[in-house]
Image: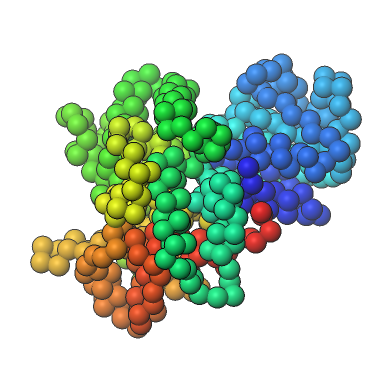
Amino acid sequence: MKRIIDHYLGEWKQRPDRKALLLRGARQVGKTYAVRELGKKFDELVEINLELNPEYGEVFSSNLDPNRILRELRLMTGKRLAPGSSLLFIDEIQQQPLAITALRYFHEKTPQIHVIAAGSLLEFAIEEVGLPVGRVASLHMYPMSFLEFLVARGAQSLAEHLIDTSSSLSISDPVHERLLRLAGEYLVLGGLPEVIETWIKYEDLNRCGEVLDMIVTAYRQDFAKYAKRHQIKYVDLVFNEVPSMTGRKFKYDALPGTWKARELSPALDLLCKASVVHRVTHSSGNAIPLKAESDPNRFKALFLDVGLAQRIMGADVKPWLLNPPVAIGNAGAAAEAFVGQELLAYSQPWAKEELYYWHREARASNAEVDYLLPMEGSVIPIEVKSGATGRLLSLRAFLNEKRGKIPYGIRFCGQSSSIHEDLHSYAIYAVPHVLRRQIPRDWF
């Protein structure tokens, strides 16, 4: 399946100042597949998996001289590993943290060799050995976006129209209904490639559910790899509860039980480091960068994938396939999660994206804007209303408070696109249209 990350991997391949590359992201988002697809553009792909074949990890344990490492890998694999025509792919590199350190020396001493590394729990190994600043590049991957889902479903023309930069988003009612139906599919399935591939092949919701269950199990099995024994029960609790807390300010005392924040906070930190959960942090939203006015103690939690989240909650998703326009109209928190997932998916992958929201907590004038989007030098507030209609008191409150600083606000909802002065309304599927100028056109 075609991915936007393919464009950035192709750019990396051609760069004369290329560094060794770390492909970062949660388990099951498609990192290994993406590298193998890139490998087809080389004469030779040399793939070593340090989890399946730990003996390769020993190559990095004596010293970090890249010439010696390459020589031993040639002997062990029987491959040429030729500069310029071979791609060396070190998968599950977190099994040997010294191999991460070795990447800097590939850049310094053998820059002509193309080297990519990936791993499902890479962030924990990086924390252990550090990442040489300016010596190793990173690309961050997320689940498949709705745009990528459209291409995988054979609807490339719809994908092209959504990111057409030459015109505003003009869509007829039949096309709008079709996009809503496809959005309904995505909200059920989520963006994990194996689930989408299963749906395309069988169109069987039960089979897709089995795949989702296996992925949930794999994530849970990972807990023991990065949490201390006494932390596992807390990690499991937060993992189970975050999906149902989407769209709300995260409060530890809202979780079931009598646990304290000091017990649950480290568990949430671990899940964020594993890229299973993303924080959406409060910001005053006066100017860019949003982080300058952020409050790390006020945040919402966004689960990795909307399909996975609903599976964990045991949500009844069949109506979204049977009557998606109505079901999406009642999607609520799932629609907000979908938009957040889309914002991450279309972000520039060379640095990890951070999401922000705005909340005014006042007894007489409480207001909240779901996301703040830095775009074209301004802060653009985003409110998600899954139905066709909805009051926009919070969005209006933000625009009024920042009058003169903010050019307009965006509402994502169930109806077709329209622009009225400082309110830009878009259908729920139109996030790629809003971000179209930062999405490469040549990836599909």
Horizontal side of residue 42 vs 359, given as left or right: right
The image quadrant that residue 314 belongs to is top left
- The answer to whether residue 149 is visible is yes
Vertically, is 193 above or below 419? above
Image location (x, y in percent) of residue 128: 55, 32
Image location (x, y in percent) of residue 111: 81, 45
Name the foreground residue: 2 vs 17. 2
| Residue placed furthest toward the front | 174
Image location (x, y in percent) of residue 99: 68, 30
Q: Residue at x 19, y 39 (%)?
A: 254
Q: Residue at x 36, y 23 (%)?
A: 232
Image quadrant where one finds the N terminus = top right
- The answer to whether residue 283 is visible is no
Vertically, is 89 above or below 419? above
Q: How many marks?
A: 0
Horizontal side of residue 113 vs 381, given as left or right: right
**How is colour applied across the structure in the image?**
rainbow
Image location (x, y in percent) of residue 230: 33, 20
Q: Residue at x 62, y 28 (%)?
A: 92
Vertically, is 59 above or below 393? above
Q: Residue at x 61, y 38 (%)?
A: 31
Image quadrant where one finds the C terminus = bottom right
Name the foreground residue: 354 vs 241. 241
Name the foreground residue: 396 vs 74. 396
